Structures are given as structure tokens and as C-alpha cells.
Image: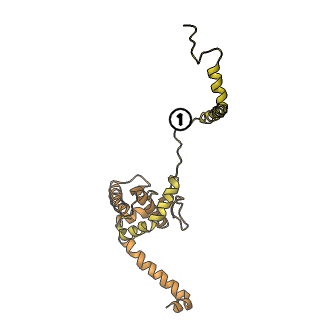
Chain colours: A orange, B yellow
Amino acid sequence: MFEFIRKNKAVAIIGGLALTAIVATPVMAQRDPAYAAARASGAIGEKSDGYLGYVTSPSGAVKAMVEDLNIKRKAAYTRKAQETNSTVEQFAFTSGCNLIMRTAPGEKYQAPDGSWQTRSSSAPMRDARCP
Amino acid sequence: MSHKISQLTDPSGNAIRSIMKNRKTTGLISGVALGLCAVLAGCVQVSAPDKPIVINLNINIKQEVVYRLDGDAKDLINSEAEIF
């Protein structure tokens, strides 16, 4: 197997990409279409504290959706914070580091200074404490 | 009553002088102690500020915590992808 990979670097790379796609696809597929659309349009973005924020003044539907997601996120952060002996704020912040890193180009994220930035193909501006 | 002067207030000072003579070294020590007291008093006079000294270690603690929690955060984002 390893010899095969060594001999066929290109095949290995393609294989790796295919694996990434398999892993990444369910993440994308599980997002609600309205949520995905709001993200893609730049109406909402990932804040540095681990929650979603409004980049532009939200419609009622978007506001309800974001509030619902943030409540669910807080519940998840609270559960994981208890499991890991940390605070909700600490776990949410760590998640925020990861969520900003995972934004797709064109999506919005909050920079450490609080400003909204559009994710480019380069690395996002994140808090110095982010791993 | 004047003939009965107290030992300590006797102008001849026999009582006190004898004590001082007998305790020359004690006098020296107490002198040194006094001097030390003066020095120490000088040190003590450097009074603490009114406001408590706050050393903010928030940044260091947080970074350690963030590194520790990173794996768990990634797991959560993957397992509950619908809310992230």
C-alpha cells in the first residue's frame, strides 16, 4: 500500500482529495439550505466567540434562524464544556477559532478587531490565541 | 520624706549607673536594634498602592485552554455539523 502511494504520488493525491470530499460532503449536506444561502450571501457570518452574527440588518426569517442555531450551539458548547472541565465561553471561543478557519471563500467572519471580513483563499485573520 | 529618695530617681544615680555599667553589651545591642528599627521603618514606609496589583494572566491561560480544547471543538463541529 505505502509502496504503491510512493510510486504513484499523483494517484495518492487524487485519492486524498477524494477522501477529503467524502469526509467534507456530509458537513455541507447537513446544513439547512436557507442557512447555507444566508452564509453564502454574506448576510451572516462567524463571530470570533463561536456564534453566528449578522453582517447586515437581518430579515425576520434570518434572525429567527440565527437565534435558533446560536441557542443550539450554546447547548452543545455547554455540554462539551462540562465534559472537558472548561467554561462555555472557553469552549465556544475554541470552536470559533475552528469555525472561522473553516469558512469558505466569500463567507463572512469576524476579525479580532471586531470588523467583518470576507474570507479569501488565504488564511483568515484570527485571534492570536487560536491554535 | 525627702530622705527617702527612690533608687531610680537618686541623683547619685548609683542604681541606674550600675545597671548601665553591668549591661554595656545590652546597651550596644539595643542601640543596634534601634538602628535596625530605623532602617526597617524606612523600608516599611514604602507603602503599598491603594489599588490592588493585578497581573492579567488571562491571555496565557486562555491560549493553553484553547490548545487543550481544540480537538474536542473539532469533534463537536464534525458531529453536529447541522448547527455549524
Q: Percent position (x, y) of residue B65?
A: 47, 60
* Residue at image coords 54%, 90%: A8
Task: Give the tally of numbered discs.
Answer: 1
Which of the two residues, A125 or A64, is positioned nearer the viewer here?
A125
Quick check: B40 left or right of B58?
right
Helix, strand or loop at disc 1?
loop
Residue A31 appears anywhere in the view: no
The answer to which quarter of the image holds residue A21 is bottom left
Which residue is identified by label 1?
B50
- Estimate how packed mark 1 is, as few (under 14), some (14 to 19) or many (20 or more) residues with alpha carbons within 10 Å: few
Looking at the image, can residue A58 be seen?
Answer: yes
Query: At x 48% / y 59%, what residue is drawn?
Result: A109
Rendering quarter of residue A42: bottom left
Residue A45, compared with residue B71, is above or below; it is: above
Percent position (x, y) of residue B34? 63, 31
User: Which amino acid does the dot numbered 1 rest on?
Assistant: Asp
In percent of width and height, residue B71 lies at 44, 68
- Which residue is at 50% across, 84% downward? A14
Tag 1 subunit? B
Residue that extends furthest to the top in the rendered view of this protein: B1
Query: Does B14 sit above or below residue A123?
Result: above
Q: In which quadrant of the rendered view does residue B15 lie?
A: top right
Q: Is residue A128 above or below residue A28?
A: above
Of residues A53 and B76, which is closer to you in this image?
A: B76
Residue A26, horizontal then vertical, whole percent: 37, 74
Q: Nearer the viewer, residue A85 or A19?
A: A85
